[in-house]
Amino acid sequence: MNLLEKASKINLKKYHYNLSEDRIAKFPLEKRDHSQLLIYEKGNIKHQHFYDINSFLPENSSLIFNNTKVIPARIHFQKQSGAKIEIFLLSPIKPTPEVAQAMLVKKKCVWHCMIGNRKRWKTTDTLERFFESDYGKIKVTASYADYEQNQIQFEWDNDAVPFVEIVEMMGSTPLPPYMNRSATDEDKPRYQTVYSKNEGAVAAPTAGLHFTEDLLNDIQEKHSIHELTLHVGAGTFQPIKTENVLEHDMHCEQIQIEKSTIEFLAKADNPIIAVGTTSIRSLESAYWFGVQLINNETDSFHIKKLYPYELGYENLPNKKDSFQAILKFLNENNLDTLHGDTEIFIFPGYKFQVVDGLITNFHQPESTLMLLIASFIGDDWQKVYEQALKNDYRFLSYGDSSLLLP
């Protein structure tokens, strides 16, 4: 039985645990690094606080951070009738699907969105809002570019203002649905890592929420820090509803990795610690793109959800060779940044090619991220989560953290 045949028989109920509402962290702690930290190392578990993490990282580790920046993706309009419409930005379509470029577009753009109270917004209706800003009064309109596909066209009457500033003026923090509350002023800085840079995520890379500037400085005295960007999409919260997990519609997310990070990965011998599941998905996806380049399969960085399993794990290049192939690709094309996207679906049976350790929060039962954790530490995920529940850890985005060292 090959890997995909085995995966098709995965019993999702095996990756269930009882997560009661009172265990979900609805608000952040007063101090970011005072969260609890569960350390799992080769089957052993200990409990610390996140501000202690520096002492428990493997010697001379390299931490890879996702520096995406959450945009206030929930945008509200009110019709003259009084009906309130919520537009949740998902991904840009026109004039560019590239998130970084789309945030800088002026005058007009089209995004794929989720629509709240959609039945009250007719296809012919145009929504309007007005703002006082440093640029003067701005009028913003929203209309359907494609009703069936939930594609929304935004227009604004000041060609000096990029879309990112329109969103900052209009939007609110896109808290996950399981928090079941409206965003507050406190959420704007707290649902954001202190090292966030590149706007485009609609959900935070929550493993990074525990770091402070002081803690990062302390870590750099003993370890190295590198960055990449994966713009986290709302699909990260999409539950698995299919009996065969392989049929789950895996979300696609955009990745950017600077050439300097690729150069480091092409020669690294020290332990690689991914800060968050988004970083681990980015690093593993980049490895598979290097494999594709070596095999002359493509020159487009797009990793389909089942590519590693379809290719198999026989005669694979090592990590250094894969990243050297990417470095050669960047040099030949005079590129300073690797741009691509990934649908990679990591579940038990996957063999990690790049990452040695993972810093991550505690995830929803029976989710794609729960399967990723199970693939990383095997059945010991049950022991980890039992210990977290027993010791009153807080769960999900604003919850506590873990350091997993298989």
Image (cartoon, rainbow, N blue to C red):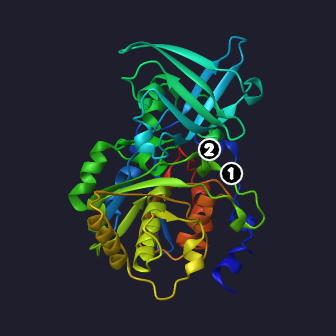
Which numbered disc, 2 or 1, marks the residue that appears first in the sequence?
1
Neighbourhood count class around disc 2 (C-alpha, 10 Å): few under 14, some 14–19, many 20 upward: some
The picture places residue 122, in percent across and down from the top left corner, at 74, 25
Q: Which residue occupies 40% across, 79% down?
A: 294
Decide if residue 281 is in sight here.
yes
SS at badge 1 = loop
**Which of 312/21 is in front?**
312
Up-down relation of residue 58 to residue 203 (above or below): below
Query: What residue type is disc 1 on?
Result: Leu
**Which of 275/301 is in front?**
301
Q: CA distance from mark 2 to mark 1?
A: 8 Å
Please state if 359 lies on the left or on the right of 387 as rendered.
left
Q: Which residue is mark 2?
A: 24
Up-down relation of residue 18 to residue 194 (above or below): below
Q: Are marks 2 and 1 in contact (CB under 8 Å)?
A: yes
Please state if 151 lies on the left or on the right of 200 as rendered.
right
Q: Which residue occupies 57% across, 48% down?
A: 396
Tell me the number on the disc at residue 336.
none
**Which of 175/102 is in front?**
102
The picture places residue 173, in percent across and down from the top left corner, at 52, 32
Q: Which residue is mark 1?
A: 19
The picture places residue 391, in percent across and down from the top left corner, at 57, 54
Q: Which residue occupies 51% across, 74% down?
A: 43
Query: What residue type is disc 2 on?
Result: Ile
Decide if residue 61 is in sight here.
no
The picture places residue 150, in percent across and down from the top left corner, at 67, 37
How many discs mark residues in the rendered view?
A: 2
Quadrant of res 153: top right
SS at badge 2 = loop
Screen quadrant of the N terminus: bottom right
Quadrant of res 309: bottom right
**Which of 193/260 is in front?**
260
